[in-house]
Image (tube, rainbow, N blue to C red):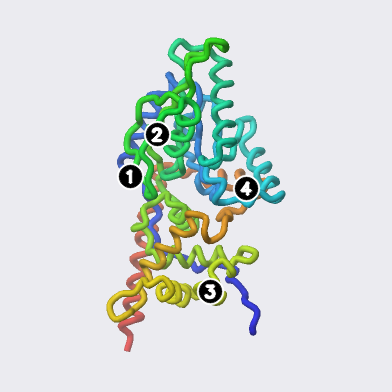
Amino acid sequence: MATFLPRSTFPSQLSLPRSYFLGHHAAGLSKMKTMLSSIDLIIECRDYRVPLTSRNPLFEQSLAGRERLVIYTKRDLGSKDRPSDRKREEIIRNWHLPHPTLFTDHKSKKDIKSVLNFAKDHAASRYSLLGSRILVVGMPNVGKSSLLNALRMAGVHKAKAAYTGAQPGVTRKIASGVKIVEKDEEKGTEGVYLVDTPGVFVPFVPDAEAMMKLALVGSVKDTIIAPVTLCDYLLFHINKQQGGPTWYREYCEPTNDVALFLEAVSRKTGRLGKGGVPDLDASALWIIQRWRQGHLGTFLLDEVEEDGLEKKMREEVGLSLSQARKQAKDAQRARGKARQAEVARVEQP
């Protein structure tokens, strides 16, 4: 039997959309700016699986001047708690110095307690008659509302205060402050309140792979990128992991062919259309959801290197909203030309 060799690169995707900056994203960001004078701390949430790609430079530009805590959510979906994971987290912590960094799984009582303790200590260090107010920001579907609910349950033992969902856009408006820490007479603190905000996407994603990563982790709706294309990109990443192909061995042998893979999944799971034809789109979406739930390996889509953040910031330099719009138009023209070329190729005798 031949040795399986995973793909070393993924094909260029010229036709991919590169923006998901919606009206409520812009409105939410504008409202956040007006609230800064009443905010004591900003918690910026990023997805552990995409520590670089889930960074939004708009927050750096718009919310500067306030103390910040960076929290990497969904750690359980990207880590096996190995020494290599701890080394990677040390690199990420160094990226954000002097700002503190925490890594969380919102279902872990220990992780949530560490965030609560940080909030309590921060509140105790600056007395306010109105209590401490914390603004929670991040890309769409990064886990802000789940974090808020976990903190509220652990801190004041009350039911969830924010709606959550598998798709982005559940939180559309900035909520009023939700209490997560009670008043403490001994420490002289008046309570801690968390303000949930809508996820804000970047105006333009210059890199097609970055867009696919954001789609895989659920920061854009599943209708934006074709499910089979997205599943192909996921298969590419799974195959690169040590032992990755064994994660789908119940469906088929190791393969780089997404159609072959999805046909096998369709037949195994009964996702068939008329006449028993495999439903590749439904199977692709099911596989993507399985991965999002941690059932097809826990790994990162971004490479974490000492100078990773520096490289990412260099890519972002000068990417203003107007430049982003220009690049979006250029990308749209490139997609149109690619489609015309494909039509001409098909129509050739």
Residue 326 is at least partly visible in this image: no
Q: Residue at x 40, y 40 (%)?
A: 199
Q: How far apart are labels 2 and 4 at the CA level? A: 36 Å
Residue 222 percent coordinates (x, y): 37, 57
Vertical side of 238 occupied by 94: above or below: above
Look at mark 2 in the image and give the residue it sits on: 160
Which residue type carries mark 4?
A: Gly
Local SS, label 2: loop
Residue 124 percent coordinates (x, y): 56, 16
Look at mark 1 in the image and give the residue it sits on: 22
Residue 111 is at least partly visible in this image: yes
Q: How far apart are labels 1 and 3 at the CA level? A: 35 Å
Local SS, label 4: helix
Q: Residues within 10 Å of mark 4 (few under 14, many from 20)?
A: some
Looking at the image, is mark 4 or mark 3 earlier in the sequence?
Answer: 3
Q: Residue at x 63, y 52 (%)?
A: 80
Which residue type carries mark 1?
A: Leu
For residue 112, what is the image quadrant?
top right
Q: How far apart are labels 3 and 2 at the CA level? A: 43 Å
Viewer-side residue, 22 vs 169: 169
Local SS, label 1: loop
Look at mark 3 in the image and give the residue it sits on: 256
Look at mark 4 in the image and give the residue it sits on: 308
Q: How far apart are labels 1 and 4 at the CA level? A: 28 Å
Looking at the image, is mark 2 or mark 4 earlier in the sequence?
Answer: 2
Q: Residue at x 42, y 49 (%)?
A: 219
Query: On the picture, is 7 further left or further right than 349?
Result: right
Q: Quick check: marks 2 and 4 in contact, CB under 8 Å? A: no
Viewer-side residue, 337 vs 298: 298
